[in-house]
Amino acid sequence: MASPDALPFDLRGLDIFLAVCEAGTMAQAARRLSLTQPAVSQAVADLERRIGVVLFDRSARPLALTAAGGALRQRASALLSEARQIAPLLREAEHARLPLLRAGLVDSLSRALMAPLAGKLDEMAEQASVLSGLTASHAGALLTRQLDLLVGADDLDEIEGLERWPLLSEPYVLLMPADVAPPARPADLVALTQTLPLVRFSARSKTGMEVERHLRRLRLDLPRRLEFDTPYGVTASVAAGAGFAITTPLCVFEAALALDGLACRPLPGPGLVRHLTLIARRQELGRLPREIAAFCRAQLAGVIPALRDLAGPASDGPLHVEGVGPQPG
Amino acid sequence: MASPDALPFDLRGLDIFLAVCEAGTMAQAARRLSLTQPAVSQAVADLERRIGVVLFDRSARPLALTAAGGALRQRASALLSEARQIAPLLREAEHARLPLLRAGLVDSLSRALMAPLAGKLDEMAEQASVLSGLTASHAGALLTRQLDLLVGADDLDEIEGLERWPLLSEPYVLLMPADVAPPARPADLVALTQTLPLVRFSARSKTGMEVERHLRRLRLDLPRRLEFDTPYGVTASVAAGAGFAITTPLCVFEAALALDGLACRPLPGPGLVRHLTLIARRQELGRLPREIAAFCRAQLAGVIPALRDLAGPASDGPLHVEGVGPQPG
DNA sequence: CGTAGCTATAACCAAAACTTATATTATCAC
DNA sequence: GTGATAATATAAGTTTTGGTTATAGCTACG
């Protein structure tokens, strides 16, 4: 077999596969794509060979999808529609600057920061708006000048021309029923998922991707059952008994739920820390980002005791508000 | 030029691009990928040519990303991590249950529905995910098959080929300090904004647009100071004394805040009602949408008393769970 | 059975992806 | 500045891949 993370297919192959799903027959799909029938036949066969799964049931004539084929159809069409969005988004990446002050705030800080931040911005600008959501989408909005400020879990260090103001660091922890024995070593997580599934953050969120990378680095392959793109979803689902989660104190706090019968436990193995950062385009807003960052740190300091209550003493080290001063970069 | 939806790149190109981002130089990326340096150089140049955007700034030697390059990096890594998950998932995909169910849930229903809905989907599918956010973005995702179900405030009646299951209706109300006299007529809202600004939902949200259209119809031009795209932002800001809002019982409930000193008052003038609907692509999931809609109605019936508490008796008429049966359309 | 329409295989061709070789450019120590 | 070093770009071949035509084998249906 090829290297472990070799790509098992190409977008072109998926595109042809989807055309076959929609057309119902390979010959018709070929016509629609302006290809010949053998080209489609080979592309499908190739896809099946490389994934190692049969996608169509050839014995039935209107060409039925197998179970795996159905699953691939869903995922492939999602993947392709995302892929098609990318290029246009990059091309329109030169927009005029809007007159009002707009901030993007990662979901997990809504409860801790949204109202005070809005109040602060309202003081500083004629018009203010605070949008909530995933940092990934906010990052694009910042670059295209649809947003002026961003507070999130990603420091976007691959992008030039930004100024970064670190706000807070917090450890990832396990959120799980209090009466379940906490795993002592990373490998115990696998055993835990036998009885209690892992409730995940979606890979659309930075948090989800960080956790995923951490697990991959530990060579842990945990089953994938339930996923959410908001801290509330993860926390509420764990509170409802659906499983356990790898999350952070702020994400738990954000949900504002009663956590009877739940406990935060340290994540076994090497620590994983989440850094929250304020980001702006460099030299466009003067000393305003610095001032807002200081304000945010002060607000967050007020929440720290509540976070320690939630997360327990194990988290004391990594959990702290950052000092002043911008990041180089 | 090629056909409108031709793919501007393939996964291999993105993979190489990401390797360059991580390695910092093309030559190093080439080594890591077991390629030669010109291969990487050409692949990157090709990607830039096909997207029509410059990705790297060659004038600086540690190879800096441009703005567009940074945006591509984020999206590309998300796309690839999704792509890599697909093949392993398909290989284990010989199950009777649906392999994957993705639902989009409007922010204002998170607290009322997210955990129970996730539990229900988890029963029905091998893997479930519930995403939160604005209905507008979910609508696009539903059409492009990134989502299978959608619960939101928009019935998307301009779009063919969907099935709609009404869930709940609720009136818009005023959320304001209890000690301020409630406006009796629409025109009194203008006077009110002299002392207390209107905290708005962003026009990106369906709720915000409905309110805006309603105000325009009443010929009211209220100043625009603070706006949010989540119910929590609006409610928290009003609770912090920043102004008053035109919102709904569910949006207030969603914030899960103590509302000391606040009251819901009826909206003066003609009533405005918000309808929450479950939407799916027609005839793709069988009777599953019907079943899920019934489940959602049952869950929502459980919070109705809490909503009546919040909204007061004035709302009794418009506030109710819908009967069974799909909408024609 | 025979025919119409689909799918699979074989043999071939052109475009792409990658290689080696070489020229050009940026950075840095001196 | 000036080489030395290490990177990127370009040019010209080679291999691989994705596509074609031609043909044979299926499947459904009258």
Image (cartoon, coloured by chain):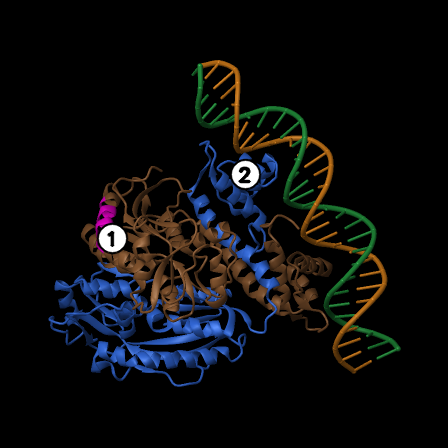
Chain colours: A brown, B blue, C green, D orange
The answer to whether residue B328 is left or right of residue A292 is right
Residue B304, how many percent across, how many down? 30, 80
Amino acid type, mark 1: Leu
User: Pointer 2 and pointer 1: residues touching (CB < 8 Å)?
Assistant: no
What residue is drawn where x is 64% and y is 58%? A51
What residue is drawn where x is 44% and y is 85%? B325
Of labels 2 and 1, the one closer to you: 1
Residue A304, how many percent across, how many down? 25, 54
**Up-down relation of residue B12 to residue A43 (above or below):** above
Residue B35, how many percent across, how many down? 61, 39
Amino acid type, mark 2: Ala
Q: Which residue is mark 1?
A: A300
What residue is drawn where x is 35% and y is 60%? A264
What residue is drawn where x is 55% and y is 50%? B8
Helix, strand or loop for the magenta stretch, by majority: helix
The answer to whether residue B270 is left or right of residue A158 is left
What segment carries the magenta color?
A291-303
Tell me if mark 1 has few (under 14), some (14-19) or many (20+) residues whose alpha carbon lies within 10 angstroms of its own.
many
Query: Which mark, by number, is residue B29?
Result: 2
Give whichever of A17, B190 is nearer the camera: A17
